[in-house]
Structure formats: C-alpha cells, structure tokens
Image (cartoon, rainbow, N blue to C red):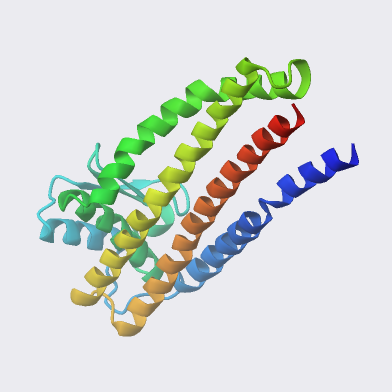
C-alpha cells in the first residue's frame, strides 16, 4: 500500500515544473503588460488604428478590426476575417497595446503568406476538439474499470489508451502552436520597427511584452507533455500489477 501511495505521489509531482512555469509565466505577463501599458507611444497612434493601417498596407482590406470584451482577450479569426482587440488594447496607444495588436496582425499575415505551421495547427484543432469530446467518457470508464471494477480488462485498457490519444493530440497541438505564436511576435516586432510606429526603445518594450506572453505557450506545452507522461505511467503501473 505504501508503494502505491508513493507511486501516485511521484505522478503528482511530475506536473510541478509545469505548474511553477505557468505561475511564473502568468506573473511575468501581468507585470510586463502592466508596466508597458502605462508607457504611451510617442506617435500616439491607437492600437485599432495601427492594426487597420498595417492590414491595409498588406492588402488585407477584407480583414476587420473589432473590439471584444475583456483584458488580454485578443485573437485573430481567419474564418471570420477579424482581428479582435480587447477593450484594454483597442483604444490604447501604449507600447504594450501596439505590440499586442501587431502580434494579431502577424497572425493575419501568416495566413496570407500560407505559413505552414499555422495551416497544420488549423487542421489539428478540430481533430483535437472532436477527440476530446468523444474520448473523455471512455477515459473515465477506463479509470473505473482499471481502478475498481475490472483491473487489466480489455475494455479498461482501450479506454485508458484513449486518454493517451487525447493527451498526445493536446501535446501535438501545443507543439505546433509554439512556433506559430513566436513567428507572429517576430513579424510584429519587424513591422513595428520597419514602419517606425515605435522607436527603438519602445520596440524593445513591445518585444518584452510579447516575450512574456510567449512563456505561457511554453508552459502549456510542458503541461501537455507531462500530462501525457503521467497518463502513460498510470497504464504502465497497472500493467505491471497484472
């Protein structure tokens, strides 16, 4: 029994590095964004105005710039052709807001330029969503079969391996998302620098904001990988007890 408790304790602390990184990343985002949201750009251009200008320059007049509720809820939707900027970003001329808006424009440019990772990511997202919806009930059945009713049963094993598929797809999605986000940030910094919307010092500030945001995606990837490892350990532990 002591061995069993020890094994589950080990499985629990496997996620500790990801948890620490996630807390640090969120803290870094909040502090960096908070700092540079108070630094107004010298040119005074609003984030929504800049996004519209950059999209027009890229011949993406069909992409709309809209405002959405919330704080740091910004995104780009290629199906709806919208750059959505959060309330705290939309009308702001801060270095942080301009960096975030440029990042979302960077996503629009990825689709225009047929950036391969973003196309792969769009294929994986619906597969991951569907598999999660269909397979999670099987995972719960597998846990019931293996932990309580019928340890080592074929039905239970099939259900548990469904969990491996879920966590595997989640890890793959996060792995593909990472270069997509970093590339969008890289495009944003290039845009802000070349167009001189921000000066060199302001561009450095925007880069810090986007760099902090990128850490959250690293933390998400680490969490997915460690969850996959932890689930594989569950299967390995029970197979060794048969």
Percent position (x, y) of residue 179? 35, 57
Q: Residue 236 in the image: state x and y as whole percent.
A: 66, 36
Outermost residue toward the right in this view: 2
Outermost residue on the bottom side: it is: 201
Using residue 242 as the reference point, say whether residue 136 is left or right of it.
Answer: left
Is residue 20 depicted above or below 224 in this figure?
Answer: below
Image quarter of the C terminus: top right
**How many labels were placed on the picture?**
0
Most foreground residue, 24 or 102: 24
Q: Residue at x 71, y 20 (%)?
A: 144
Q: Quadrant of the N terminus?
A: top right
> In which quarter of the view is residue 229 placed?
top right
Nearest the eye: 62 or 241: 241
Quarter of the image holding residue 208?
bottom left
Residue at image location 16% in from the left, 50% down from the top: 112
Given residues 215 and 14, the one toward you in this image is 14
Going 75% across and 24% down the picture, which residue do you hit?
147
Answer with left or right where residue 58 lies relative to residue 127: left
Is residue 74 at least partly visible in the picture? Answer: no
Determine which quarter of the picture holds residue 24.
bottom right
Q: Residue at x 38, y 72 (%)?
A: 207
Residue 150, percent from left and from top: 73, 16
Residue nearer the viewer, 161 or 86: 161
Residue 50 picture location, percent across and down: 24, 63
Can the viewer see residue 201 in this picture?
yes
Determine whether 136 is above or below 228 in the image: above
């Amino acid at each position: 029994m002591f061995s069993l408790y020890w094994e589950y304790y080990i499985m629990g602390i496997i996620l500790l590095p990801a948890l620490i990184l996630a807390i640090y990343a969120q803290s870094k985002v909040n502090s960096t964004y908070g700092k540079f949201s108070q630094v107004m750009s010298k040119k005074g251009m609003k984030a929504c105005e800049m996004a519209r200008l950059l999209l027009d320059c890229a011949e993406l007049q069909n992409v709309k710039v809209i405002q959405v509720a919330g704080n740091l809820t910004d995104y780009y939707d290629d199906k709806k052709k919208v750059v959505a900027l959060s309330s705290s970003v939309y009308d702001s001329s801060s270095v942080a807001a301009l960096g975030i808006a440029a990042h979302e424009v960077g996503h629009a440019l990825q689709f225009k330029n047929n950036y391969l990772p973003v196309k792969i990511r769009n294929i994986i997202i619906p597969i991951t969503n569907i598999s999660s919806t269909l397979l999670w009930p099987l995972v719960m059945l597998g846990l019931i079969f293996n932990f309580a009713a019928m340890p080592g049963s074929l039905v239970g094993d099939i259900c548990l391996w469904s969990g491996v598929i879920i966590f595997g797809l989640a890890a793959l999605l996060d792995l593909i998302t990472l270069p997509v986000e970093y590339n969008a940030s890289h495009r944003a910094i290039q845009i802000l620098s070349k167009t001189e919307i921000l000066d060199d010092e302001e561009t450095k500030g925007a880069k810090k904001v986007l760099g902090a945001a990128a850490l959250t995606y690293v933390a998400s990837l680490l969490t997915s990988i460690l969850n996959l490892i932890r689930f594989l350990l569950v299967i390995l532990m029970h197979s060794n007890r048969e």
